[in-house]
Image: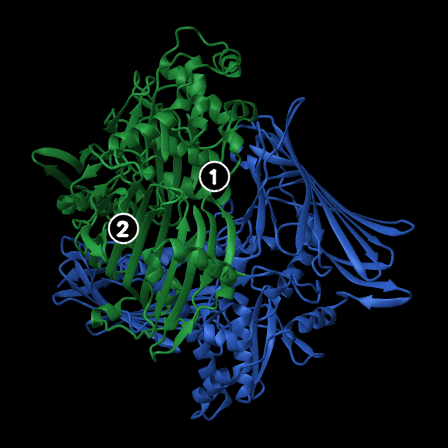
């Protein structure tokens, strides 16, 4: 987080060349998007309305499907006064049919999200559509945010917030340099109005493998800090303290009755264990294995964990339910465990900057053992004890110490030495058929990824096809003569698989020489970044080190004529070393490839591509054998 | 609330009816079932899947009620098994009343956890599926059995289907069809087993018992979903209805709106003032129909919602909005106004349902096409990615009901008229930089038929990353450091009016990853320039018949400059000859070869699929033809200094 902020400061030193938008070449764009948020206060009760206006233009008939539109809302908001119509020159046709649908599917089992669906009539080339409605925001903790950009370009984007003069508004701007957002604050007699305006904003579309778009999309988050009534200042979300005490008030509603079974399980799991670490590990594994993750999004219920007794008997829960049962079990056996709020990596916010619920979307448990802080996220069923889930690395954890005390600790980025793959391969050659037997030992997130993929991404493919697609050892003609994937259900700190393979016609035999490329796997070789495909940085799930130890048995009657030179390109953020060593009738190739960053900014792409090209070059080198 | 409701029902119903579901129940004291070790290896396995469908006519009102009971017992052996079965969705489509829903788990230790019915949630108006009751199974852990039993009363509909095969194995599947002396029919699909008549008490019923149903298997070139085992049933009061009557009734009803007696005036005006404006009087029917389709697809939106006005032709023409069903009406009015003869084709997506003319089913009537018999082309009204063409691949090979203007219909298999319709032609010129560091590929490509539509649509509708990914595919995917120096397209507008106009791409790309050093020689990964090719695996016996999207062919000519001072070796890897012949008929082939012409190496490839359905008994031959491309993709040649 801090890194990103620093980076933005650097950028703002220069004048950023904003992408110039040529609206005439767009199929569809927004002429105007605006929202005006109005806060009123009467006897400690807030009334908050947000008037939304969107006007779009169909420049061609290529994307008429955007006529299908919808308004999302949840139980914290109410939608009123919807009006929608299409204009074709002077003729105007109104939308006459709106339909409310529950949201369904995706990763969430049950959600309070709903949408009002409708279709703009008579949409064709040149049509302009307008949508207006009012959002009533029921809880002053959820003022929300305004995004100046959208999935298509926007000609004009305006956000207005009006608050009474006895209400203090907090706000924080993000990525304004990407759209040249203008700000104006106007104090009137009774109210203060804040207005942000941006013109000709380019499109912002989510991308695969990129950093969160929120790192790039110009937006502003607003929140109510406090209000004064009868000379007394009353806090809402002044700072993290206020946010925390609100969270505590919700957490305190957790049902703590009937915990006998939960406690007895915890007791049984730990009765023969000596250290707190062993005990915590046993309990963590039990929750990972026995509580199935089922996601719910249900209003304020979405903030209150279900009682541990109920979660234990139902054997399922969402993140906060799992965090809470861990909390109960761990504390029961004397381990210092705490409820912890946290945002996943796609939310690039800090509690200090915006002390609002927008920062987090996840809950875990933190334990303190012998001065060590350990983050436990059982929603990841395969992550080893002691490591956080990979998607919360680098994020601020808001740890509840007591009802009045909290601590914010950054979840450390896990070092590349913690997620390793050691690939030991012995290669022999029979005519032009290559035979290899491989052993792969994985730890940390390398292990988590493997188990997760083997369980959920294999589908109906055979293990052979699955391994061929995953590692692309040799090529997709590789035949597996033996596969041992180990016991996917057991909990371990490292994981071993092994296999034997054969690849026909792999070596090229020409005259008395054999040409052979010993790089059966070429990790990262497809990783060149095309800037037109990757506008928002590159996200890397975890740091890793992969160590390939290959032993090639030189076939009888041949000698090594040419061995590639040792080569290395070791940089701070990534690197590789390839070394070749002949020992009697063996050639031992040792390759180490590492990734030591979680993110690449666009400015770093060029260097990264140079690095990848150097790696590809290293992969291209074959050995040459000659008949003696 | 729910309890009172159930109780009240009980009072009313026990006195007048005695449906089977009332006495059907799960075991009071369940225990875990014995499984073989192979069954325990499965991530999950159904021990029992039982469906009871009962039709019952009231003696007082003559109304027919329908009750459906579902009873499943599933063993979950690992966490993916739990994840597959621990969330239950019960569709409320056509449901009048929920009679009962209960669920429980029996743990390895025999502990029983019953579902707390307060945890059942309702969700409404989900996509096109309607409402659902949903709940998560309570107490599910590795090695436990999940048991779900529910009964719903449905609105009377004489037709229904029950899926009998799923993506997990089933030890025992039972289906009971109780018609209580009403006339009914039942038919099983994708299994040889049929229903037996048997007595349930004094009631004659139809019963189907299947054991050891394997899990469905996803295969390439297969219609997995529509090949599942299932049962279709019909039950109606009137005993005289034949299958012909059933088709006839429905088709006559549907067709009425599709052959209007009176053409809407605004449609006539639009044809005259917009669609055919400025066109010569004698333009071909192909062009006329294209102009119409281009107009509709540039002015109308097709949607699925509950707005009933979408069936009203005036509303449709005024608001330019229609449902998948009613957009055909708009076409009908325009076609009549343009005096183009047309037929309506009603069929189903072949990947979802195989049309059976011998047994009436509403599931067969899901896709609507317009067929122009004079030019043997189809309009696909709901497909924004298509224009006037041969039948799209979603329905190709399925049967359909073809209806003419006299509302006469016949069933026919939907076929492709021109076997050479879809073709990819590529001409590639390859040269090397002086230092053998880079390869340049200058390429000209023509995509005709279905390929052309696909490219036009993707390049028009996609944007950003997706579009760039597709451009990568169009210029040879899998070349690690490929740089696209030029990419130009022709005939890329969606709205075309000329028959089978190819989509053209002219590109120049560059890569150095295609060249590998080996001592002082260079290995050129020539095969890679045709892009990544899928590899068909088959360790198990082929299950599904082979169905390709459509007939198609590829013709490549690759010319490689041979730099001065180098000789070529390893050319034999370029020669591949694979084919599949059945009863003397050539069904598909791959043939690649080369010639040296001066300082050029010229490679030609011909890959052809003359039909789109292949017998699965010849799967191995088919696989060899398909894999020939992936073999060629591995071909490499060696340049050694003379």
Residue B289 place in picture, x, y as percent: 40, 18
Q: What element carries label 2?
A: strand
Report the front residue among B257 and B287. B257
Mark 2 crowdedness (10 Å alpha carbons): few <14, some 14-19, many ≥20 = many
Residue B522 place in picture, x, y as percent: 27, 49
Q: In this view, does A431 lie above or below B177?
A: below
Report the front residue among A211 and B623. B623
**Are circles 1 and 2 on residues that touch, CB within 8 Å?**
no
Q: In this view, does A364 lie above or below B61?
A: below
Q: Is residue B285 above or below residue A439?
A: above
Q: In which quarter of the image is the N terminus of chain B?
A: bottom right
Q: In which quarter of the image is residue A126?
A: top right
The residue drawn where x is 58% and y is 47% is A115
Report the front residue among A203 and B70. B70
- In the rendered image, the residue lying farthest to the top is B281
Residue B638 place in picture, x, y as percent: 23, 47
Q: In this view, does B569 lie above or below A97?
A: below
Chain identifier, colour green: B
Return the chain for callout 2. Answer: B
Residue B199 place in picture, x, y as percent: 20, 55
- Horizontally, residue B595 falls left or right of residue B233, namely left
The residue drawn where x is 49% and y is 13% is B268
Return the chain for callout 1. Answer: B
Residue at the disc numbered 2: B177
Chain identifier, colour blue: A
Foreground mark, 1 or 2, reads 2
Mark 1 crowdedness (10 Å alpha carbons): few <14, some 14-19, many ≥20 = some
Q: Residue B462 carries which label?
A: 1
> From this viewpoint, is residue B425 visible?
no
Q: In which quarter of the image is residue A502?
A: bottom left
Dot 1 or dot 2: first in sequence order is 2
């Amino acid at each position: 987080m801090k890194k990103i902020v620093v980076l933005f400061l650097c950028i703002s030193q220069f004048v950023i060349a904003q992408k110039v938008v040529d609206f005439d070449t767009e199929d569809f764009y927004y002429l105007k998007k605006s929202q005006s948020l109005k806060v009123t206060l009467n006897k400690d009760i807030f009334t908050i309305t947000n008037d939304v206006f969107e006007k779009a233009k169909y420049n061609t008939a290529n994307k008429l499907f955007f006529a299908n539109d919808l308004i999302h809302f949840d139980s914290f908001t109410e939608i009123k006064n919807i009006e929608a119509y299409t204009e074709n020159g002077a003729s105007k046709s109104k939308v006459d049919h709106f339909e409310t649908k529950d949201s369904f599917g995706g990763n969430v089992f049950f959600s309070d999200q709903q949408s009002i669906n409708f279709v703009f009539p008579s949409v064709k080339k040149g049509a302009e559509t307008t949508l207006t409605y009012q959002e009533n925001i029921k809880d002053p903790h959820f003022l929300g945010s305004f995004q100046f950009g959208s999935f298509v370009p926007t000609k004009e984007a305006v956000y207005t917030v009006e608050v009474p003069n006895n209400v203090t508004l907090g706000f924080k701007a993000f990525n304004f340099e990407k759209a040249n957002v203008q700000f104006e604050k106007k104090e009137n007699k009774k109210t203060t109005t804040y207005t942000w305006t941006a013109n000709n904003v380019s499109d912002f579309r989510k991308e695969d493998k990129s950093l969160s778009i929120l790192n790039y999309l110009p937006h502003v988050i607003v929140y109510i800090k406090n209000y004064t009534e009868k000379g007394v200042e009353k806090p809402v979300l002044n700072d993290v303290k206020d946010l925390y005490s609100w969270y505590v008030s919700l957490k305190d509603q957790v049902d703590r009755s009937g915990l006998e079974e939960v406690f007895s399980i915890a007791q049984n799991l730990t009765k023969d264990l000596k250290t707190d670490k062993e005990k915590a590990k046993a309990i963590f594994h039990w929750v990972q294995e026995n509580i199935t993750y089922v996601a719910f999004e249900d209003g304020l219920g979405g903030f209150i964990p279900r009682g541990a007794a109920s979660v234990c008997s139902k054997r399922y829960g969402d993140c906060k339910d799992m965090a809470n049962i861990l909390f109960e079990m761990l504390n029961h056996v004397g381990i210092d465990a705490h409820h912890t709020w946290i945002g996943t990596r796609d939310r690039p916010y800090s509690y200090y900057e915006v002390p609002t619920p927008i920062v987090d979307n996840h809950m875990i448990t933190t334990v303190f053992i012998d001065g060590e802080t350990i983050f436990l996220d059982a929603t990841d069923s395969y992550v080893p004890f002691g490591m956080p889930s990979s998607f919360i690395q680098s994020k601020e954890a808001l740890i509840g110490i007591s009802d009045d005390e909290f601590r914010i600790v950054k979840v450390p980025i896990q070092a590349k030495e913690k997620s390793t793959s050691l690939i030991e391969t012995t290669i022999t050659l029979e005519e032009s058929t290559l035979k290899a037997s491989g052993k792969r030992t994985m730890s940390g997130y390398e292990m988590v990824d493997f188990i997760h993929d083997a369980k959920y991404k294999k589908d109906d493919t055979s293990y052979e096809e699955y391994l061929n697609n995953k590692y692309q050892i040799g090529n997709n003609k590789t035949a597996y003569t033996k596969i041992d994937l180990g016991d996917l259900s057991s909990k371990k700190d490292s994981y071993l698989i092994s296999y034997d393979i054969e690849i026909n016609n792999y070596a090229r035999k020409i005259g008395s020489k054999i040409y052979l490329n010993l790089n059966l796997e070429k990790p990262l070789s497809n990783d060149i970044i095309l800037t037109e495909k990757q506008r928002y940085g590159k996200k890397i799930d975890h740091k890793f080190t992969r160590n390939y130890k290959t032993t090639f048995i030189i076939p009888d009657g041949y000698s090594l004529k040419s061995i590639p030179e040792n080569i290395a390109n070791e940089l701070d953020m990534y690197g590789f070393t390839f070394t070749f060593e002949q020992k009697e009738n063996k050639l031992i190739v040792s390759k180490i490839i590492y990734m030591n960053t979680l993110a690449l900014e666009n400015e770093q792409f060029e260097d990264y591509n140079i690095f990848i090209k150097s790696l590809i070059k290293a992969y291209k080198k074959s050995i040459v054998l000659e008949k003696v | 609330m729910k309890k009172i409701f159930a109780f009240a029902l009980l009072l009313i119903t026990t006195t007048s009816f005695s449906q089977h579901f009332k006495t059907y129940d799960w075991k009071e004291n369940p225990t875990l079932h014995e499984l073989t070790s192979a069954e325990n290896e499965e991530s999950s396995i159904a021990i029992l899947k039982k469906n009871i469908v009962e039709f019952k006519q009231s003696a007082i009102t003559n109304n027919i009620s329908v009750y459906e009971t579902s009873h499943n017992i599933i063993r979950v052996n690992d966490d993916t098994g739990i994840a597959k079965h621990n969330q239950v969705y019960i569709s409320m489509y056509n449901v009048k009343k929920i009679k009962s829903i209960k669920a429980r788990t029996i743990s390895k230790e025999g502990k029983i956890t019953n579902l707390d019915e307060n945890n059942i949630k309702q969700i409404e108006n989900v996509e096109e599926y309607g409402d659902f009751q949903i709940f998560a199974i309570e107490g599910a852990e590795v090695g436990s059995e999940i048991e779900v039993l529910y009964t719903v009363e449905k609105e009377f509909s004489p037709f229904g289907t029950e899926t009998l095969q799923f993506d997990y194995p089933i030890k025992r599947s039972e289906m009971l069809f109780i018609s209580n002396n009403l006339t009914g029919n039942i038919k099983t699909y994708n299994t040889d087993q049929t229903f037996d008549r048997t007595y349930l008490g004094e009631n004659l019923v139809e019963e189907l018992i299947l054991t050891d149903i394997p899990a469905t298997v996803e295969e390439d070139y297969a219609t997995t979903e529509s090949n599942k085992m299932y049962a279709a049933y019909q039950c109606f009061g009137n005993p005289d209805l034949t299958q012909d009557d059933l088709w006839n009734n429905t088709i006559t009803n549907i067709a009425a709106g599709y052959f209007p007696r009176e053409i809407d005036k605004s449609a006539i005006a639009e044809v005259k003032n917009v669609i055919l404006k400025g066109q010569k009087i004698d333009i071909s029917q192909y062009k006329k129909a294209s102009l119409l389709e281009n107009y509709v697809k540039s002015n109308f939106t097709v949607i699925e919602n509950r707005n009933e006005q979408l069936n009203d032709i005036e509303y449709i023409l005024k608001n330019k909005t229609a449902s998948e069903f009613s957009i055909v009406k708009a076409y009908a009015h325009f076609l009549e106004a343009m005096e183009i003869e047309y037929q309506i084709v009603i069929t189903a997506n072949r990947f979802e349902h195989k049309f059976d003319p011998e047994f009436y089913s509403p599931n067969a009537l899901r896709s609507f096409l317009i067929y122009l018999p004079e030019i043997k082309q189809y309009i696909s009204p709901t497909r924004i990615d298509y224009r006037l063409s041969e039948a799209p691949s979603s329905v190709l090979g399925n049967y359909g009901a073809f209806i003419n203007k006299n509302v006469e219909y016949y069933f026919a298999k939907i076929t492709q008229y021109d076997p050479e319709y879809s073709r990819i032609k590529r001409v590639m010129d390859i040269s090397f930089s002086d230092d053998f560091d880079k390869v340049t590929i200058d390429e000209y490509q023509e995509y005709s038929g279905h390929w052309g539509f696909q490219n036009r649509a993707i390049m028009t509708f996609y944007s950003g990353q997706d579009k760039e990914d597709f451009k990568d595919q169009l210029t040879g995917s899998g070349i690690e450091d490929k740089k696209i120096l030029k990419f130009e397209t022709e005939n890329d507008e969606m709205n075309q009016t000329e028959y089978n106009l190819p989509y053209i791409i002219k590109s120049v790309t560059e890569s150095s990853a295609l060249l590998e050093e080996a001592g002082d020689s260079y290995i050129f990964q020539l095969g890679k320039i045709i892009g990544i090719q899928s590899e068909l695996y088959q360790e198990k016996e082929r299950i599904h018949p082979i169905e390709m999207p459509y007939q198609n062919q590829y013709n490549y000519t690759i010319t490689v400059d041979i730099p001065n001072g180098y000789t070529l070796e390893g050319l034999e890897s370029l020669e591949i000859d694979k084919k599949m012949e059945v009863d003397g008929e050539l069904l598909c082939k791959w043939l690649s070869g080369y010639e040296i012409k001066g300082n050029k190496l010229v490679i030609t490839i011909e890959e052809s699929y003359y039909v789109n359905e292949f017998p699965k008994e010849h799967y191995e031959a088919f696989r060899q033809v398909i894999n020939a491309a992936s073999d060629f993709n591995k071909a490499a040649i060696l340049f050694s200094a003379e």
